Image (cartoon, rainbow, N blue to C red):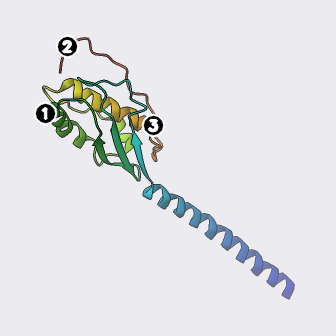
């Protein structure tokens, strides 16, 4: 009788420990995903995306699946047009999840169309490369080319 009670107690202890271990791993994985930071450099993946005067590489910082910042790196765009495009386009992405940002149809800066479109295309290509923490399926960015002359 004592052996049966001892064996039952050991079995309960083992079962409880295994259950606790599984819950701890699940919480640890969720915490790890929330604290993961990625910095995506678009200079290599979007090297054929041209603004008005050339490429516009970016560093996109994603923390816990949310876009924290977008930094425009060295480029050949006109500073005034670049400033206008940055002020209009980039804030539309900050604070959005990767999944939300991929679906975004951002407004472009009037008078800085090519630069705005280059920033948007760089962001979309960077987000396609991002390790999304959401369960949504990745969609490729559309490959439309404009035929009209705009800036």
Q: Quadrant of residue 136?
A: top left
Residue 55 position within the rendered picture, expressed as x and y whole percent measured from the top left: 31, 28
Q: As rendered, which of 112 and 128 lies closer to the eye?
A: 112
Residue 42 position within the rendered picture, expressed as x and y whole percent measured from the top left: 38, 35
Q: As rendered, which of 59 and 142 lies closer to the eye?
A: 59
- Identify the mark nearer the N-term, 1 or 2: 1
Count of numbered circles in the view: 3
In the picture, measured across the screen, residue 34 lies left or right of residue 78, that is right
- Identify the mark nearer the N-term, 3 or 1: 1
Residue 146 position within the rendered picture, expressed as x and y whole percent measured from the top left: 27, 15
Which one is closest to the eye, mark 1 or mark 2? Answer: 1
- Identify the mark nearer the N-term, 3 or 2: 3
Q: Is label 1 in a helix, a strand or a loop?
A: helix
Residue at 71% over, 77% down: 13
Residue at 17% over, 27% down: 112
Q: Is residue 117 visible?
A: yes
Disc 3 target residue: 129
**Which of the image's four quarters has the C terminus?**
top left
Q: Quadrant of residue 83?
A: top left
Q: Quadrant of residue 121?
A: top left
Q: As rendered, which of 136 and 54 lies closer to the eye?
A: 54
Q: As rendered, which of 97 and 23 lies closer to the eye?
A: 97
Residue 115 position within the rendered picture, expressed as x and y whole percent measured from the top left: 23, 28
Residue ranking furthest to the top = 147
Disc 1 target residue: 80
Callout 1–callout 2 Cβ contact below 8 Å: no
Q: Is residue 1 visible?
A: no
Q: Is label 2 in a helix, a strand or a loop?
A: loop
Callout 3–callout 1 Cβ contact below 8 Å: no
Any mark on residue 149, and which? 2
Compute the Cα span from label 3 to label 1. 29 Å
């Amino acid at each position: 009788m004592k052996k049966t009670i001892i064996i039952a107690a050991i079995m309960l202890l083992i079962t409880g420990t295994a259950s606790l271990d599984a819950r701890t791993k699940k919480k640890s994985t969720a915490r790890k995903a929330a604290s993961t930071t990625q910095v995506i450099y678009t200079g290599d993946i979007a090297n054929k995306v041209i603004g008005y005067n050339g490429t516009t590489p970016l560093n996109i910082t994603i923390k816990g699946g949310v876009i924290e910042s977008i930094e425009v790196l060295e480029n050949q765009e006109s500073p005034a047009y670049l400033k206008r495009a940055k002020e209009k386009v980039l804030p539309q992405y900050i604070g959005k999840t990767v999944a939300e940002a991929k679906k975004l149809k951002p407004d472009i800066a009037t008078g800085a169309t090519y630069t705005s479109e280059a920033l948007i295309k760089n962001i979309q290509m960077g987000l396609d490369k991002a390790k999304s923490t959401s369960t949504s399926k990745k969609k490729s960015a559309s490959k439309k080319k404009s035929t009209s002359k705009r800036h």
